[in-house]
Image (cartoon, helix red, strand yellow):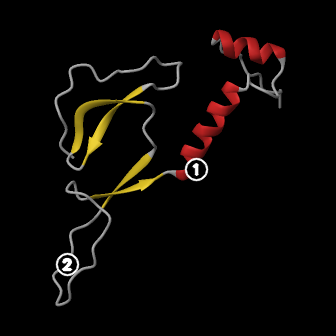
Amino acid sequence: MSSASIDNPILNRPYDPPGRHFVIGSNGITGEIATGRRLSESYVPVPPARKSKRAQEALDFDTTGERRDINTLINDIRRDVELWRGRGYTGVTEDVRKSVELRVVIPVFQAAV
């Protein structure tokens, strides 16, 4: 996958939901910046076709030789988390709510075995 030259690849803050992303075109990253979060996709390499007498059926891939599969589960989780944040973190304790709002990491203790 060829890509455009990008001077600074970091567009978003680490603890905030992404607000911008680089556009991925048929030949790789274009360098163009789009607003919002990019959908989660997997890029699956497609092996070259063997020589055969019959024509190969068209596959869903672009010029990079990869097939793009949308990760539906990840995109659904992202949507649900965004809704949960928008509703004020419903279902959590007050301590967890404060730590999430202040971006404080709460240590997790394991029970002694």
First reached walking from the N terminus: tag 2 or tag 1:
2
Say left or right for 10 vs 72.
left
Say left or right for 70 vs 57.
right
Q: Residue at x 74, y 24 (%)?
A: 89
Helix, strand or loop at label 1? It is: helix
Residue 73: numbered disc:
1
Q: Residue at x 77, y 22 (%)?
A: 109
Task: Using the rendered view, name the quadrant where residue 59 is placed.
Answer: bottom left
- In 3D space, how far apart are the residues under numbered discs 2 and 1 (Cα atoms)? 33 Å
Residue 92: numbered disc:
none
Mark 2 is on which residue type? Arg
Q: Residue at x 34, y 21 (%)?
A: 10
Mark 1 is on which residue type? Leu
Which residue is identified by label 2? Answer: 50
Of labels 2 and 1, the one closer to you: 1
- Circle 1 Cα neighbour tier, 10 Å, few/some/many (<14 / 14–19 / ≥20): few
**Outermost residue toward the bottom in this view:** 53
Compared to 99, does 23 lie above or below?
Answer: below
Say left or right for 113 vs 99.
right
Compared to 103, does 34 lie above or below?
Answer: below
